[in-house]
Structure formats: C-alpha cells, structure tokens
C-alpha cells in the first residue's frame, strides 16, 4: 500500500457535517484531528459539531419524516440495494480508509466492508415485508386491525471498533422502516461514516433522511436531542457505563431504546472438544479486530485434561502472528485504537501477573515504535480475582483458566453482569445443547468463533443491552405497532 493511495482515500471523504443533504462546517467553526493509531499522527481534520448543529439536524430530520414515512417500501429497499452495490464496488478504497483511522489490517477492513454491505442487502429485502394483521374479534363484535408504522426520527450512535458495519446495522433497518436519522459516529473513526453517508446520497437517499454529526463533544450534542420531544428513537452501541447514562437521559421522553453494550464473553473448551477446531475458533474469537470487539473471547475456560496442549498450541499461534501497521503486507494484528486503550490492556496484564498468572507469550507493550501496539498475549493459571477476568479487555490478550466439570464451567461463565455472547467447543450434541440453554447470554457460538451475521438477531441480556439488531426482528426496533378497533 503506497502513501499516495492512502492520501487519496482520505482526501476523497467529505470532512463536514451532513445536515439536510448539505455538507457544512460546524456553527462555531470547530474542527478536530483524526489520528492514525499506527503512527499517532493526524490524518486530517473534520468538523466538530456542537449543540446548535445537533438541533439543526433534528429540525431537518423531523421535517423530512412525514414524506419519508410515506415513501413506498419498494423504493426504500431499492435505495438500500443500490448502496449495497456501491459498497461492494468501493470496498478496496473504503478498507484502506478504515484501516488508516482504526488500525485493523486491510484484509479485515475489507471483510468488514463486505459484512457492512450485507446489512443493506438484508434490510432492502425486509422493507417490503413489513406487515400487520386483520382478524375477527373473539366475540365477533368488530374487527382487530394491526398496522406497523415507523417510530420516527432516530439518533444512532456508533462505536469506533466497527465503524462501517455498526453504521449499516442501524441505518439499514431505519431506512427500510421509514425513519429519518441523525448519526453520531465515534470521534476516533468518523471517516468511514462520512464516506458511507456520501454513498447513501449517491444511492438516492433523499436529503434530510440521514444527517451525520462528527464531534468530540458527545454530551453537548446528544443531550439536547434526547430532551427534545421530536426525537423518538435511540440506538447505541458502546460501553455499558455510557449506555446507562443514555437510558437515564432517554427516560424523560420515554424514548424507544436499543442498547448493544459491553461484553465479557466466556469461551469454553470441553474435554471432548476437537483440539484443532477449538484452537482455530479461539484465535478467531480472540484476535478478530485486534481483540477490540464486544464479542471477543474475554475468558477462556479449558478442561483440565486439555489445558497443556491447548495453551501450548494457542501460544504458538498467537506468538507467530505479525504485528504492524494495518496497511503493510502480511500484517495480522494492528495497533490498538489509542494510548488509553493500550495502557488499559497493559494494566490488566500486569495485574494478572502480580496475582500469579504466567505469561506464555507477549505480555509487554511493543517498545521503540510509534503508534499504540500491543502483542498477542496468552496468560495461563489466571487466578479468579484478576481484573482481566472481570473487565472487558478490548485487546489481543487471552487469559486461560482450567475447570474440572460442566457445572463448574457454566457457573464460572455466568458469573458476570454481562451477557452478550459465549462460545462452546464440544463434539457432543447433548452437551452442546445443555450449554446453549444454561449460558446466560443473548448469543452462543457452538463450535464457531464468529456469530455475527446480518441474518441473525444480534444482542445481549443482563447489562449487555436491550433489543436486537439484524435478522427478521431487527426492523422491529424501528416500527411502532398500532391497533385499530373496527366496528363493522
């Protein structure tokens, strides 16, 4: 990848706020720099929205809502289909852009673009399947008519770790349902969303339906929107701590909320697991997206009979991975998003080692190079009190704990306030079903290290969130159900 290609990818992206179909500067003229986490150097500057910009975006979204809601479902679906095609056509350029602002290897970024595009294809097909119902009342006195209507203007807040896919996973159903939107991407990775917004315009999305606010002042931008009665929906992907605050702010107007929050995913390797399959699955579940994923395997529980060969193979695999700038050839693990992210990972590892864990590979920040790099790390004999087993790691660190029987593994796995996803490796269908039913998570990967697909409902239980994204029920988050009692 040449510097020329990188510059072109950045230069092509609009740098302003998108409000009412127009790219414009922030009202106060504010801008901020977007950083390349592999070099700690700025890539470019983008507009830094404030409260006035937020209310201008809501004015536009509210004004556009009636016309957009009345747009034919087929037309809404065709816009999403056209955007799907454009994303596929531009995947190479968009992958470079994503890697520059987020850090993951280009091959992974390209995979995310394809994954992101599939949400548009999926919801293009769901737009024409919104239905209701008509039935005779049980007592025969009248009819029950049920219709589905768009919720209305929605605030969509997306994270930095999957800057394109988390956008399409929210925008897709909102467009299909007939909702206008204000999107606030994470300040670390605004460029992918800005590029996506431009593509949706090229695909035919009417002005005002999608508005984008890039900002380093999320509280100043989001709170007035949440307090305004014209906003009817909030969808947020991010930390549980921030999610709690947003739920509190949303309560005043009783907003419809969707929350995809933090995770502390257990990965369980049973005594009858296929060892090769379990190691392969663990590498994917742990190292996908540099480990910066709410679905990443956070706690790896291995049956005592397999602990030595499993950890040995895992350490060999992770220790051989190439760490570097995501645009360089052959790199498998890129930098973490920023200094705070790297320092947190390092502090979790140091805490575990002080408590008695053994470092099999990695375990120290990579010195002598710019950027926020941390090597793939395997920890064995991790004690129960270590922070690394309690806190979301968001980095390439695999803590391994042994267990003696299924009941113990299930108890350990469920011993957390989170409940997003869990992974189980076993060759027994009976055992797999038992685990799937007993684990307190919204999703289970059974002999699979990746569960995400646009065709399935994504979401968690407990403090990992509310609602579901994707699948046939993903569009329900953007639809109200209205019942009409008909006298015949």
Image (cartoon, grey):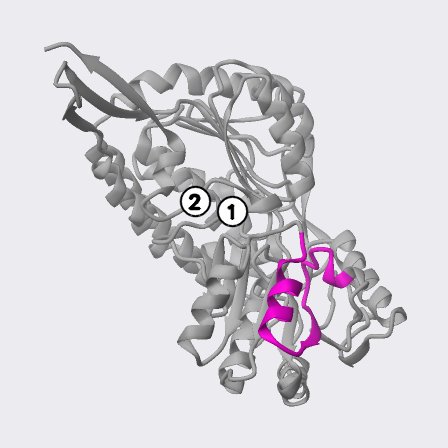
Label 1, label 2: how far apart the Cα atoms are: 20 Å
In the image, which is nearer the foreground, mark 1 or mark 2? 2
Mark 2 — residue? 469
Relative to residue 392, is residue 305 depicted above or below?
below
Where disc 1 sits, the SS reads helix
Q: Position of residue 369 (x, y in %)?
A: 78, 68
At 52% from the left and 70% from the top, the residue drawn is: 424
Q: Is mark 2 on a helix, strand or loop?
A: loop
Q: Is residue 124 visible?
A: yes
Residue 265 percent across, percent down from the top left: 60, 60
The residue labelled by disc 1 is: 192
Residue 328 position in % (x across, y down): 59, 71
What residue sits 33% from the left and 44% below the top? 83
Highlighted range, magenta? 388-416
Q: Which residue lies furthest to the right in this view?
A: 354
Q: Is residue 404 magenta?
A: yes
Labels 1 and 2: the sequence-earlier one: 1
Q: For this rendering, which residue is in front, 282 or 111?
A: 282
The correct choice, above or below, for 265 with respect to 488 in the image is below
Q: Position of residue 404 (x, y in %)?
A: 66, 79
Residue 110 visible to the viewer: no
């Amino acid at each position: 990848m040449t510097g020329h290609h990188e510059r072109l990818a950045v230069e092509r992206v609009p740098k302003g706020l998108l409000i009412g179909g127009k790219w414009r500067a922030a009202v106060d003229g504010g801008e901020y720099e977007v950083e390349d986490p592999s070099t700690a150097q700025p890539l470019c500057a983008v507009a830094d929205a404030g409260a006035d910009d937020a209310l201008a975006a809501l004015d536009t979204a509210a004004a556009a809502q009636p016309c957009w809601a009345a747009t034919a479902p087929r037309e809404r679906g065709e816009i999403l289909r056209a955007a799907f095609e454009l994303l596929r056509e531009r995947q190479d350029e968009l992958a470079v852009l994503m890697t520059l602002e987020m850090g993951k290897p280009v091959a992974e970024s390209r995979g995310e673009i394809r994954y992101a595009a599939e949400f548009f294809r999926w919801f293009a097909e769901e737009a024409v399947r919104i239905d209701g119902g008509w039935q005779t009342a049980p007592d025969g006195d009248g009819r029950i008519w049920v219709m589905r209507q768009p919720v209305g203007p929605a605030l969509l807040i997306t994270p930095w770790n999957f800057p394109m896919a988390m956008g399409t996973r929210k925008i897709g159903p909102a467009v299909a349902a007939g909702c206008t939107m204000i999107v606030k991407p994470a300040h670390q990775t605004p460029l992918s969303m800005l590029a996506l917004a431009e593509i949706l315009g090229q695909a035919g999305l009417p002005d005002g339906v999608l508005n984008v606010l890039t900002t380093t002042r999320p509280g100043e931008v989001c709170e007035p929107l949440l307090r305004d009665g014209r906003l009817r929906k909030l969808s947020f992907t991010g930390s549980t701590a921030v999610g709690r605050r947003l739920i509190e702010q949303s309560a005043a107007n009783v907003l419809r909320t969707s929350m995809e929050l933090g995770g502390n995913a257990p990965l369980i390797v049973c005594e009858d697991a296929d060892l090769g399959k379990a190691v392969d699955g663990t590498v994917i579940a742990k190292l996908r997206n540099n480990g910066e994923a709410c679905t990443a395997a956070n706690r790896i529980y291995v049956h005592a009979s397999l602990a030595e060969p499993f950890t040995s193979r895992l350490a060999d695999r992770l220790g051989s991975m190439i760490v570097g700038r995501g645009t360089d050839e052959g790199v498998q693990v890129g930098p973490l998003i920023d200094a705070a992210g790297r320092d947190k990972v390092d502090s979790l590892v140091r805490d575990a080692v002080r408590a008695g864990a053994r470092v099999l590979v990695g375990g120290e920040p990579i010195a002598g190079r710019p950027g926020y790099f941390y090597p793939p790390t395997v920890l064995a004999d991790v004690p129960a009190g270590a922070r690394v087993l309690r806190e979301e790691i968001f980095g390439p660190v695999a803590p391994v704990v042994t267990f003696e029987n299924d009941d113990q593994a299930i108890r350990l796995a469920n011993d957390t306030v989170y409940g997003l996803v869990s992974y189980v490796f076993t060759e027994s269908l009976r055992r797999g079903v038992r685990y799937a039913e007993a684990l307190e998570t919204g999703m289970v990967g059974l002999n699979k290290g990746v569960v995400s697909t646009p065709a399935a409902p994504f979401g968690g239980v407990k403090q990992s969130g509310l609602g579901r994204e994707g699948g046939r029920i993903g569009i329900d988050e953007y639809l109200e159900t209205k019942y009409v009692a008909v006298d015949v």
